[in-house]
Each structure stands twice: as structure tokens, then as C-alpha cells.
Amino acid sequence: MIKILAFETSCDDTSVAVIDDNYKVYANLISSQAKHEEFGGVVPELASRLHIKNIMQLTNAALNKANTSLAEIDAVAVSINPGLIGSLLVGVSFAKSIAYSIGKPLIAVNHMIGHIYANKIDNPHLKPPYLALVVSGGHTELVHFKSDTEFEIIGKTRDDAAGEAFDKVAKLLNLGYPGGPLIDKRAKLGDPDFHIFPRALNRKDNYEFSFSGFKTSVRNYLENKDEEFIEKHLSDITASVQKAIVDVLVKKTVNYAKREKIDTIIVAGGVSANSLLREQITLNAKKIGAKAYFPAMQYCMDNAAMIGAAAIEKYEKKQFADLTLNAFSTKGLRFI
Ligand code: KG4
Ligand code: ZN
């Protein structure tokens, strides 16, 4: 059995985890930076400073929780892209120094691949081929994994990501940040058919996404309403917004799976925590004879356990990084 110490610092959450090669998670600690809330979004410079402040203490706490000493760690994993460059650099520098000091291999992980591998924690048997819907604050991608080493991007967003759409609409509604979980919660009390917001690029054979026009249409809709109306129908509006976003994600994913006869669908990234998305993908996948998988709730949002999970196969294949490893912020999913 091998144990991996994993780090995730790509955005505003500092996370440290200990995981073994059977995908058993011993600790997965996340220190969320509440400080950004007052700015209504993540302030990059502040995020990297808070990572520096938190990471040492969090590492000690994770090792304690895992009842594991540094001497028992076999490899160190870290997300190196995409993300905020200053934030990524804190994790990468710290991971490099730990790997060097204990004389164990260093493994570089792409954050988006990490989100996908979060699914393996509770379903270690999952193997390509599968269709992955990757939906986070910065990404919306439909990806066909043909094997462990080969994938094809079927479609991605032309502008805003799905999580970003949730966040921006929540801001318009003064709900707070991050908006996705707040809209999800509020929408449970409302009527999803209260207002039909537009679904962009709705043609059957189109697998691209666009959420920028959708956000504008919500803004235009709200501009014509008085405060009293918005307050009275807040739950109905959030439910209608959520349905519009989820409809598009589900339809494109299931249509492609059906067309290509793919029987395994994986949802990954922060938006995979959305209750309607989980319900609707499961239901519609079933209709075409496919099965949908999601990470457990604690592995949907950014966390280090998913980075450790993605590092396991790399450890087995001896795909190690050296101490010249650097972080880079470029968007997208890639094997590194
Ligand atoms: O993957 P993630 O934690 O960070 C990025 O890599 O971006 O995703 C964060 C995004 C945010 O936009 C947040 O609003 C969204 O995931 N999110 C949700 C839910 N929980 C988180 N969106 C919809 N419904 C949720 N329950
Ligand atoms: Zn993420």
C-alpha cells in the first residue's frame, strides 16, 4: 500500500489530503477563505497570501487526522494548473519542498483531471471509455475519454462557465458568493417553470455551450421588475435560472452519449454538487441505458483528495515530476 500527501491551492481554498492507492481517504482538510466574500469574488493576491498563511498548519492537521507521519508518505501530489498563478505557486513550492525533504517522488496533477478522478474515490473501478461533463467556476467541457491516455473535447463554453453563470446571477440577485450552492438551496422552494430563460446553442447536434447571453437575459428580466416582485418570487426566479442552466448541460451530455453509444457518464467540478443536475442526469442517462456518476458531495468542490486520487495511476506508471516543476495558469484539461 502506498500513501500520497496531496495539495490543492488553485483558487481560494487551501486543501491537504492523505489518500492511499485503494482510493481510501484518511484526511481531506479544506480551509476556505471567507475573506473574499466581502468583495463578491476571489481577490487573487489575497488568496495567495492566505494560502501561505494556512498551508503549513493544515498539512500538520491533515497528517494528524490521517494518523500518518511524513516518514510514512510515499509520494507528494500537487495541482499545477489551471488556476490563479499566485495561488498555484504556493502549493507547488510547498509540495516540492516536502517531496525534497522526505526524498519521495513529486507528482503533478491537472486540476480538471483531479475533478474527474474525484469520481474514483467512491467508484475505484471506473475506467474509460466514458463521457465526462466537467463543470466548475472556470470550465464547462464535455470530454470523451477514450482511454487512460486519450481524450477528445467534444464541446466547451464560448464565454462564461456554468459555475460562473450561477455566481453572476446570484450576484444580480444579491444572494452572496459563491452563488451556485445558494441558488441550489433557494431553488428547492420555487417553481422552475415560473419563467423560461433562454437556452443558448440549443440545436440537437451542437455540443458547445454559452452562458453569457443567458446572464444578460436574467439581468434584462430583473431590470423590468420592482424589488417587491423580485423578493416575493426569489425562489421561483432561482428555480427557473437553475433549470435553464441544468437543462442545457443535461441535454447536450445525454444527446452525445446516446449518439456515440457511451454507457458511462461522469460529472465533475463544483457544479456537480448541484442537486437538480444530479437528479436530471441520473434520470436521463437511465432513459438511454447509461449510468451517471458524481463525486460524493465533499469531493465536488476544490479539494486535495481528488488531486491525490489522480496521482495514483501516475505513481503506478512512475510519471514523476522533478524539482524544476512550475505552475501555469492556462485553462483546460490536459495530461501533464
Ligand atoms: O470546482 P470548483 O470548486 O472551483 C473551480 O475550479 O472553479 O467550482 C466552483 C463553482 C462555483 O462557480 C460554484 O458556484 C459552483 O461551483 N457550485 C455550484 C454548486 N456548488 C458549487 N453550482 C451549482 N450548484 C451547486 N450546488
Ligand atoms: Zn475546481
Image (spheres, grey):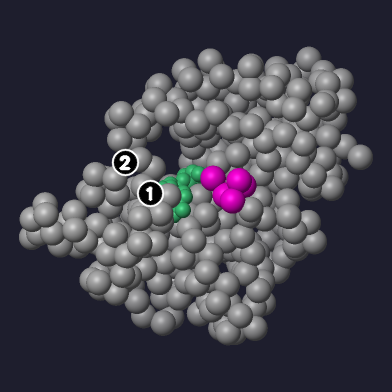
Q: Position of residue 268 (x, y in %)?
A: 57, 56
Front residue of 294/331: it is 294
- At x 11% / y 54%, what residue is drawn? 228
**Residue extending furthest toward the right:** 1
Classify residue 250 as left or right of residue 177.
right
Q: Secondary structure at mark 2?
A: loop
**Which quadrant, please, contains the C terminus?**
top right
The response on whether ligand 1 sits within 8 Å of label 1 is no
Front residue of 125/175: it is 175
- At x 73% / y 45%, what residue is drawn? 309
Determine which of the numbered discs, if any, sits on residue 182 in the image: 1
Classify residue 135 as left or right of residue 221.
right
> Type of residue at label 1?
Leu
Magenta segment boundaries in residue numbering: 297-301
Front residue of 7/60: it is 60
Determine which of the numbered discs, if any, sits on residue 329 in the image: none
Q: Is residue 299 magenta?
A: yes
**Residue highlighted by disc 2:** 176
- At x 56% / y 19%, what residue is drawn? 54
Q: Determine whether 174 is above or below 3 in the image.
A: below
Residue 133 lies in quadrant: bottom right
* Main SS category, magenta section: helix
> Type of residue at label 2?
Gly
Q: Is residue 241 visible?
A: no
Q: Position of residue 183 (x, y in %)?
A: 36, 54
Q: Position of residue 55 (x, y in %)?
A: 60, 20
Q: Secondary structure at mark 1?
A: helix
Q: Determine whether 56 is above or below 230 in the image.
A: above
Give the alpha-carbon distance from disc 1 to disc 2, as whole Å: 8 Å
Q: Determine whether 80 is above or below 132 in the image.
A: above
